[in-house]
Image (spheres, helix red, strand yellow):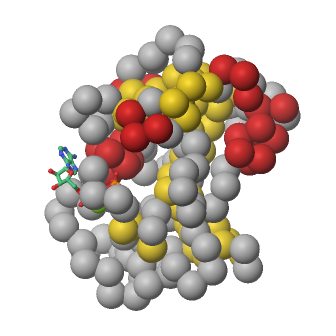
Amino acid sequence: MAGLVACYWSTGTEPSTEGLVFALWKHGATVILPVLRDDDDLDWAVYDGPDTLAPGRHGIMEPVDTRRGVDTIRTAALVIVPALAVDPHSGVRLGRGGGSYDRALARVGPNVPTVALLHEGEMRPGLPAEPHDRPVKYAALPSGIRVVPVKEST
Ligand SMILES: Nc1ncnc2c1ncn2[C@@H]1O[C@H](COP(=O)(O)OP(=O)(O)OP(=O)(O)O)[C@@H](O)[C@H]1O
Ligand SMILES: [Mg+2]
């Protein structure tokens, strides 16, 4: 079991992360969840059970625990993020337009597994990418885990 896992609390039509967060916590992982800052960057706080969440900006549930700082994600052994779609060739994510997860993923080291949770059919080849977009290495769908091909550095 990974020590520190960065996850998120799902909202709207996103695949639900409630059971995942609860199971990780029950199995002894330390789960950090985002606390959305006023500048749309992501602070992090530790999940300590279902009774320790309260709605944050945009009504998304956030831990009421102490904010640990934007750099907390640097120490995560596993990073799980939301996406509306992922490009199967590049791992580029389509987000909700805040750039929050691009900023968070920019702080994650090259050897840490990064996973986006998708509904079936949300792998989309040819997604537009800007220089600030940060790809994920894996996408998890109901039908299984897709691995993004590693790009050979030239
Ligand atoms: N590393 C960064 N530093 C500062 N601002 C950034 C950074 N990355 C993205 N942004 C800001 O976020 C804006 C939105 O980015 P983008 O459209 O890629 O969001 P998104 O990928 O849909 O959102 P998210 O990353 O939260 O899922 C960018 O135009 C940029 O202003
Ligand atoms: Mg982006």
Rendered-image quadrant of the C terminus: bottom left
User: Which quadrant contains ligand 2?
Assistant: bottom left
Please name the residue shown 47% across and 38% down the image: 59
Among the 4 quarters of the image, the one containing residue 24: top right
Please name the residue shown 66% across and 20% down the image: 52
Camera sees residue 1: no
Please name the residue shown 57% across and 61% down the image: 14
**Left or right: where 10 falls relative to 107:** right
Camera sees residue 5: yes
Among the 4 quarters of the image, the one containing residue 40: top left
Query: Image height check: is 77 above or below 14?
Result: above
Residue 37 is situated, as x and y percent measured from the top left of the image, at 31, 29
Residue 21 is situated, as x and y percent measured from the top left of the image, at 71, 41
Residue 65 is situated, as x and y percent measured from the top left of the image, at 56, 14
Query: Image height check: is 143 above or below 153?
Result: below
Query: Image height check: is 134 above or below 59?
Result: below
Please name the residue shown 72% across and 74% down the image: 142
Residue situated in front as seen by the camera: 34 or 70: 34
Residue situated in front as seen by the camera: 114 or 54: 54
Instruction: Count all numbered tags in the image, as a single digit.
Output: 0
**Left or right: where 112 falls relative to 96:** right
Kindly give the residue lying farthest to the top in the view shown. 66
Kindly give the residue lying farthest to the left in the view shown. 131
Rendered-image quadrant of the N terminus: top right
Kindly give the residue lying farthest to the right in the view shown. 27
Residue situated in front as seen by the camera: 19 or 134: 19
Residue situated in front as seen by the camera: 150 or 139: 139
